[in-house]
């Protein structure tokens, strides 16, 4: 009765099962995987956020496939101010309810069933589901750790085929926290140009550079057709508000037909609601206070992790430039999943095993740096005791 694409393995993994058991026994679990910013004790300007959703203009129905102009202008202003992206015309922007929806529009635009997209490994686990739903085949290209994470261009050359339609980069990557550096961007442009591929850049964590310096955005990439995805889910730590976008840039001869087609995809769903579009400028504005709080949290947890790691020799933290996560290298005495389950059962600490993010081998745990400070400190202490 059902499609092959929906034949997912629906059983729970061992970590989820263990979590339910530990929680039902009444133990308080220290959750070092938390990625929901609305549950980590940030101070939001609740009055202003809720008020922004009550704009009287929202009583008018103005179905704009790319999204209301005022919202797109606010997004263009964000790129100008934060990332020095000059000349991003609001007409180059298409609003979506989430970055995930943005991905699905771009996959639909670029790929026939069975076409391929190159994706970084390790990276974000949702890609697989997004690709399955759009009948796209993901082909991983490795990121290599050598004094920091680097893209491996010889591997990219090896995996490209005539069915490849694009390269996905996550800038900075989740969970490695590594940027695509300017020299890598140049090589990527050459690679995409040579093979006639589009670039898809996921920049949801772009504002969370640990040195607090503004980073270059792919939204100003002009050399090849580029789709830059982001949204308020991370920029303003408001994932429940469902505002994201696709920014298309590159040679006009590619961007114009891409936008014309994207407009029809967006028009088919018209998924953005009016109150949220009128609220978008105010929601984007929330980033100033929220990012300050989140970066303070991330940096203080990272310093605490380093302080505790300095007292032992078994585990090391990998170099990280940005984002909400840290990767800790642990000795391989069992699989990472077994280690995570053991930590949960014995120490009531929840961490993500590296294989959730497609790390090339065992020996990696991923910790969320937005965890409340006390939980993070106690969780790391118990983790190091156990390891
Ligand atoms: C790299 C990356 N891209 C996209 C998303 C999802 O963003 P959105 O909530 O806008 O769909 C996440 C969520 O954690 C992410 O880590």
Image (cartoon, rainbow, N blue to C red):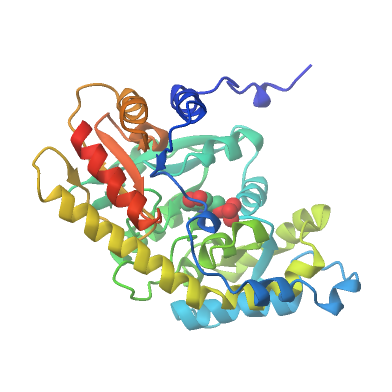
Near-viewer residue (258 or 100): 100
Q: Quadrant of the C terminus?
A: top left
Near-viewer residue (235 or 341): 341
**Horizontal arrangement in the rendering, residue 152 relative to residue 197 (left or right):** left
Vertically, is 13 above or below 213? Answer: above
Q: Quadrant of residue 362?
A: top left
Residue 74 in picture, x, y percent from top left: 63, 79
Q: Residue furthest right?
A: 60
Residue 344 in picture, x, y percent from top left: 37, 30
Vertically, is 18 above or below 348? Answer: above
Residue 90 visible to an observer of this rendering: no
Residue 361 visible to an observer of this rendering: yes
Q: Quadrant of residue 361?
A: top left
Residue 191 in picture, x, y percent from top left: 39, 53
Residue at coordinates 33% horizontally, 74% vertically from top-left?
212
Residue 160 in picture, x, y percent from top left: 42, 40
Residue at coordinates 76% horizontally, 57% vertically from top-left?
266
Vertically, is 84 above or below 13? Answer: below
**Horizontal arrangement in the rendering, residue 124 relative to residue 64 (left or right):** left
- How many labels sit on residues? 0
């Amino acid at each position: 009765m059902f499609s092959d694409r929906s034949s997912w393995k629906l059983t729970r993994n061992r970590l989820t099962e263990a979590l339910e058991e530990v929680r039902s026994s009444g133990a308080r679990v220290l959750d070092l995987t938390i990625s929901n910013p609305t549950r980590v004790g940030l101070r939001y300007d609740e009055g202003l956020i809720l008020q922004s959703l009550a704009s009287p203009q929202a009583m008018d129905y103005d179905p704009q496939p790319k999204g209301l102009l005022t919202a797109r202008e606010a997004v263009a202003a964000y790129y100008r101010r934060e990332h020095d992206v000059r000349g991003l015309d609001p007409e180059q922007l298409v609003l979506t309810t989430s970055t995930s929806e943005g991905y699905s529009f771009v996959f639909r635009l670029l790929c026939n069933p069975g076409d391929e997209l190159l994706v970084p490994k390790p990276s974000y686990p949702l890609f697989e589901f997004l690709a399955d739903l759009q009948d796209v085949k993901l082909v991983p290209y490795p990121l290599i750790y050598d004094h920091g994470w680097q893209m491996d261009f010889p591997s990219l050359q090896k995996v490209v085929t005539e069915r490849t339609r694009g390269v996905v980069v996550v800038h900075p990557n989740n969970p490695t926290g590594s940027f695509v550096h300017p020299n890598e961007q140049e090589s990527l442009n050459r690679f995409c140009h040579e093979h006639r591929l589009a670039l898809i850049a996921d920049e949801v964590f772009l504002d969370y550079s640990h040195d607090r310096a503004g980073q270059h955005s792919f939204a100003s990439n002009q050399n090849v057709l580029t789709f830059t995805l982001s949204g308020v889910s991370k920029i303003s730590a408001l994932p429940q508000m469902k505002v994201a976008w696709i920014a298309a840039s590159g040679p006009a001869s590619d961007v114009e037909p891409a936008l014309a087609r994207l407009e029809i995809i967006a028009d088919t769903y018209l998924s953005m609601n009016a109150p949220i579009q009128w609220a978008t400028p105010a929601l984007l504005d929330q980033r100033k206070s929220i990012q300050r709080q989140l970066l303070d949290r991330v940096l203080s947890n990272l310093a605490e992790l380093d302080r505790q790691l300095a007292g032992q020799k078994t585990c090391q933290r990998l170099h990280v430039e940005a984002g909400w996560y840290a990767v800790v290298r642990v000795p391989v005495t069992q699989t990472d999943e077994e280690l995570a389950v053991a930590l949960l059962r014995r120490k009531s600490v929840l961490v993500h095993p590296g294989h959730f993010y497609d790390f090339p081998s065992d020996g990696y745990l991923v910790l969320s740096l937005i965890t409340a400070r006390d939980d993070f400190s106690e969780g790391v202490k118990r983790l190091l005791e156990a390891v």
